[in-house]
Image: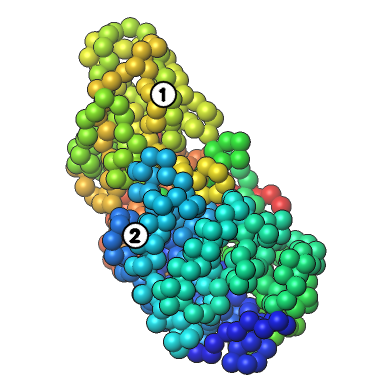
Amino acid sequence: MPELRIDPDGFLLDGEPFRILSGGLHYFRVHPGQWADRLAKARHLGLNTVETYIPWNLHQPAPGAPRMDGGLDLPRFLDLAAEQGLHVLLRPGPYICAEWDGGGLPSWLLAEPGIRLRSTDPRYLDAVDAWFGALLPCLTPYLATRGGPVLAVQVENEYGAHGDDQDYLTHLAGLLRGHGVDVPLFTCDQPGDLARGSIPGVLATVNFDTGAAGHLAALRAHQPQGPLMVTEFWSGWFDRWGAARTVRGAADAAAELDAALTAGASVNLYMFHGGTNFGFTNGANRKHTYRPTVTSYDYDAPLDESGDPTPKYAAFREVIARHAPVPDAPAPEPSRKLNVPGIRLGESASLLACADRLGEAVAGPRPLAMEELGQDFGFVLYAARLPAAGPAHLRLDGVRDRAQVFVDRQPVGVLERESDHRALTFTVPSAGARLEVLVENQGRVNYGPGIADRKGLLGEARLNGEPLGEWTSRPIGLADPGAPAYRPTQAAPVGPAFYRGAFTVEEPADTFLDLAGWTKGNAWINGFPLGRYWSRGPQRRLYVPGPVLRAGANEIVVLELHATADAGVDLRDTPDLGPTQE
């Protein structure tokens, strides 16, 4: 593969002027069985490059050798990109934002009290050094200087919005160089943060959605020579629970893309194809209140969540064709979709009753945070005995992020971080009654000063003004949703419960799980974690990638945290991401 060089007038590829036309495509948000399809559609759009982050928290869920298997087989993704004739921009962080849990920083960092993330704190840098020392040897064979597809590598991510520690950025750049990364390095920032987020000797690039001319002028004022590059041209936006879906008109986005290309800039579409926050991987924002991101990362992108072209795909292809050759080939067709209504989930299991199958309780004088328990995602079940019968006022200092409270297995209330709910009252039926608090991690904050976002119950728990001691803290592991002891459902379970059912298909294809009538929880098909659902919307259906299904019998499991009107679901052939706002 050719090598990229930075010239005072722009990029050179093997000595010839070159413009990067790239699209964001996160391998970890796309089923690996669909990587080749998405890459081929990038090439058809007229792109010559794809961009991806690398999520530290998935690749290294504990210190040690990185995972590079299945959906995390980054070398295979790079090979597939090269087969399509696509170059690659790699963005290894260590912090990636990406509306991803904790911005990609692993939760085990937060087991260290007082650690300062994204800084020169030695505890943080030691972990970063070890991570890059494990990761980069896997990737250096894929650098363009070794004949691979990787043209350039990013240093950190929008650091200027976080701080101005040049020593930290310089350390990261030196770490990359020290591990053999000899392709160009770059930083990316929003226009007002360029001075804080860039360092000498590393190409500065800019991120925006509108105002191309002015923002590129700001980049040129900051960096008088070298290529103009937009690392994130925001083609759409992400959604959060409880708000309308955000969309951006194709004509408006195409006009801004044309303005950036007319100005001579290289551009990376963020996103070309967003994909899905499968499982528990979504992040959250904290702008005055805590706001978790939905499961879908459709992003109103040129390719939708299921990989089908949108009107924006055609509009962008038309713009790109004015500035560069595009392949002479028919437009991609939407994929076949399945419609399987009326799937019954006839077996169930109470989560509280089978909690001992899902994790081992740890006793102590206070509730333990999720990170203290060595847990990344999901839930923690806390339990204590109540000393006396009668009226009780429970106050929990820190609920991260949503707590369901039970007394002798009966629900007595919900406390939500998003609404700053910390206290409730109830009646204790008898001395020694069992208090249980099921706390859901709804996604760690991925942007801003709140990224050190520990989960579970934090601080003190008080009952009628007095500290409540002698707790057990039980991590609820959901890697295997088949672990509970299921029985035929005779009556609807009280409280959180797993529901299980089966369905058959003749030929697997993409589909969308409709959970109308359900309240809040998570879903799996054949053990694959589809993600979270919540009746508050906007998202109403979960995307099911075709490769998850099997010809013949398939199993579905739903963890419902509250109640359902009817233990049945449908597979539909169209998405429903909710009502929109522009």
Residue 500 or residue 74, whichever sits in front? 74
Amino acid bearing label 2: Gln
Q: Residue at x 27, y 8 (%)?
A: 388
Residue tagged by mark 1? 396
Task: Give how far across and how far down residue 217 sits, in percent.
Answer: 79, 67
- In this view of the protein, can residue 70 be seen by the observer? no
- Mark 2 vs mark 1, foreground winner is 2
Task: Give how far across and how far down residue 66 sits, in percent.
Answer: 32, 65
Residue 241 or residue 518, whichever sits in front? 241
Instruction: Specify the farthest residue to the top.
Output: 390
Task: Give how far across and how far down residue 163 sits, in percent.
Answer: 59, 51
Instruction: State the scheme by which the image is colored.
Output: rainbow
Relative vertical location of residue 516 with respect to residue 570 in this rendering, above or below: above
Residue 490 or residue 480, whichever sits in front? 480
- In this view of the protein, can residue 172 be seen by the observer? yes
Relative vertical location of residue 353 with respect to residue 526 in this rendering, above or below: above
Q: Find residue 254 and name its label.
A: none
Task: Give how far across and how far down residue 360 sits, in percent.
Answer: 20, 39
At mark 2, the secondary structure is: loop
Relative vertical location of residue 300 with respect to residue 115 in this rendering, above or below: below
Residue tagged by mark 2? 60
Neighbour class for label 1 at 10 Å: few (<14), some, many (≥20)? Answer: some
Marks 2 and 1, the one that precedes in the sequence? 2
Q: Would you say 407 lies left or right of 104 here?
A: left
Residue 320 or residue 3, whichever sits in front? 3
Q: Would you say 78 lies left or right of 204 here?
A: left
Amino acid bearing label 1: Leu
At mark 1, the secondary structure is: strand
Instruction: Specify the farthest residue to the bottom.
Output: 15
Q: Please count the marks in the image.
A: 2
Tell me whether circle 2 and circle 1 mark residues in contact (CB < 8 Å): no
